[in-house]
Image: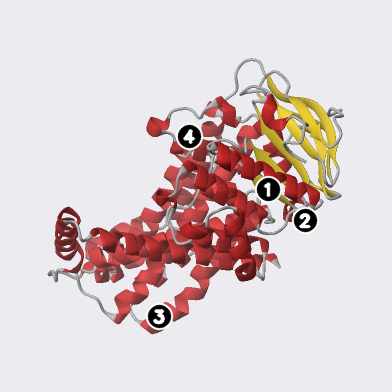
Amino acid sequence: MIEVQGLTKSYGSVAAVGDLSFSVAPGEVLGLVGPNGAGKTTTLRSLAGIVRPAAGTIRIGGHDMERDPVAAKRLLAFMPDEPHLFDYLTVEEHLRFTARLYQVADVEQRLPALLQELELSEKAKALPGELSRGMKQKLVIGCGLLHDPSALLFDEPLTGLDPAGIRRMKQTIRERARQGAAVVLSSHLLQGAESRGHFPDAHRHMIAAALYLTGRSLVNATRRRVARLRQPKYLIGLVVGGLYFYWFFFRPRRGAGLGAIASPGGEIVAVGLVGALVLLKWLFGSAETPFTFSLAETQYLFTAPLTRRQVVDFKLLRSQLPLFISAVLSALVFSSGQVTGLRLFRVVGLWLVYSTLQLHYAGASLVRAGLTQHGVTGLRRRLGTLLGLASLMALVWWSLRRALPGIVTAFQDGPTQGYAALTSVMHSGALGVLVWPLEALVAPLLAASPAAFATRLPAALLVLAVHYVWVVRSTLAFEEAAVEHAAKMAEPGNRPAPSACGWHRPAHRPAPSSGRTPSERPAT
């Protein structure tokens, strides 16, 4: 059962959906009919939990979408009008990935019949680039049907299908309705939705899904690139790239490299650099969503039975591999091509710094977005940041003013004595409290031995954990902004997304009409 009462959604002064109410019983099919821009997609995205309505209630199988979104999403499937897939997952791997999101234990038993029903058996091992538009649409629908949902949401389900595919898709929708599913579909063509017989444990699984997506994408991308080496231009590119990496990363060079950061002034330099990056983010960062998702991720994750925290965890987990690779490359650059056990530990230290900065940037963006929602924007927000920065600078000056003559005298005796005196001041008083998180974060990177690294690691992990809690405890809704950002980034030249998808609205929206089977009562 799908129940909607008083659904209202506006974008600024433009009303996309106004006080819409209807219900769809098991076995019924409701059609939302109207021209592009009528609000059909916005309605379906609200039902799927992607868009948060301004007013009204949505219940799926008796579960309120606002109060119990995980239970509600476990019962539904949303098939968007435009199929967005992961570039390096095959057809059957998309289905297995979906099975992990929805905790479908017998996916291997369901796969053959579902692939046969959607006529994708011969394409089971194919990547999305090898599929036609209609096959991609079928795959998206197959992923939606995999967990036997009791509520089905189709946005323009016949788009991109040939006449034979349209007939089979109508048959699939009718069959699911006969089995007891409540179905809502949208169409800008009345004949597609008319009623004359055309239509009748979660966190662990999230981690498994993220690892599966990352692992299979990496394997398939590698296979595809290796296969390209049969072409001379790609083989030449590999050789040139290999020489480039050897010259800049692996070629032995003179100098202490990364070991130089363990010098007397290394801690001050590292703390100052990380502190400067943090201050720049607060001064010049944007209020946009800190979580950037691809269109495929928004399609699969935002409608899955996952909490907002689990979606954030999924994204953070997937980002760790690129961050770790960046740490490895950075360590190679600064180690003068020398690879030792200690420098391998410092790779972990760099990864901790990169991961914590990523979380801090996300938290700062969430704070700025929250202030924007409360009307604190532009100049007022920057003035507040500058006031905070001025307070920090005053605290630093207050801590250094009495010790400054001694620091100057120590530097006159030699750099080692000077840096030691400055470090001593940094570790005491109010300044010591202020910079402790930065010191703790960079400490493993500066360790002179594996034993020192192990001693300093717990404090750095504590700083990382505090940032993680800060980000995941945020109640700021980011799904709608993430979908719009993903659509914008997917457009060539960052052109605005088409209005048919509900992301850019015209000045006026006619209300969608409805067609329903088996009875023809309109939505109330």
Residue type at tag 2: Ala
Label 3 or label 4, whichever lies nearer to me, is: 4
Mark 4 or 1, which is nearer the eye? 1
With 343 as the anchor, is 271 left or right in this view? right
What residue is pinned by disc 1? Answer: 172
Q: Mark 4 vs mark 1: which is more N-terminal?
A: 1
Q: Which residue is mark 2?
A: 71
What residue is disc 4 on?
A: 488
Vertical relation: 33 (above or below) 118: above
Looking at the rendered structure, the kind of residue marked 4 is Lys
Q: Quadrant of residue 236?
A: bottom left
Could you tell me if residue 127 is visible in this image?
yes
Earlier sequence position, callout 1 versus callout 3? 1
Whether tag 2 and tag 1 are in contact, CB under 8 A, the answer is no
The image shows a total of numbered marks equal to 4
Q: Position of residue 145 (x, y in %)?
A: 67, 54
Q: How far apart are the alpha carbons under marks 3 and 2?
A: 47 Å
- SS for tag 1? helix
As helix, strand or loop, the secondary structure at mark 4 comes to helix
Per the image, label 2 sits on a secondary structure element best described as helix
Give the mark nearest the N terminus, 3 or 4.
3
Going 70% across and 45% down the picture, which residue do you hit? Answer: 173
Label 4 or label 2, whichever comes before in sequence order = 2
Amino acid type, callout 3: Ala
- Residue 511: image x %, image y %? 73, 21
Q: Nearer the viewer, residue 358 or 493?
A: 493
In three-dimensional space, the C-alpha distance between marks 2 and 1, rounded to whole angstroms, equals 25 Å
Q: Is residue 214 left or right of residue 470?
A: left
**CB of mark 3 within 8 Å of CB of mark 4?**
no
Question: At 29% across and 59% down in the image, what residue appears?
Answer: 225
* Amino acid on which disc 1 is placed: Thr
Cα gap from disc 1 to disc 3, whole angstroms: 63 Å
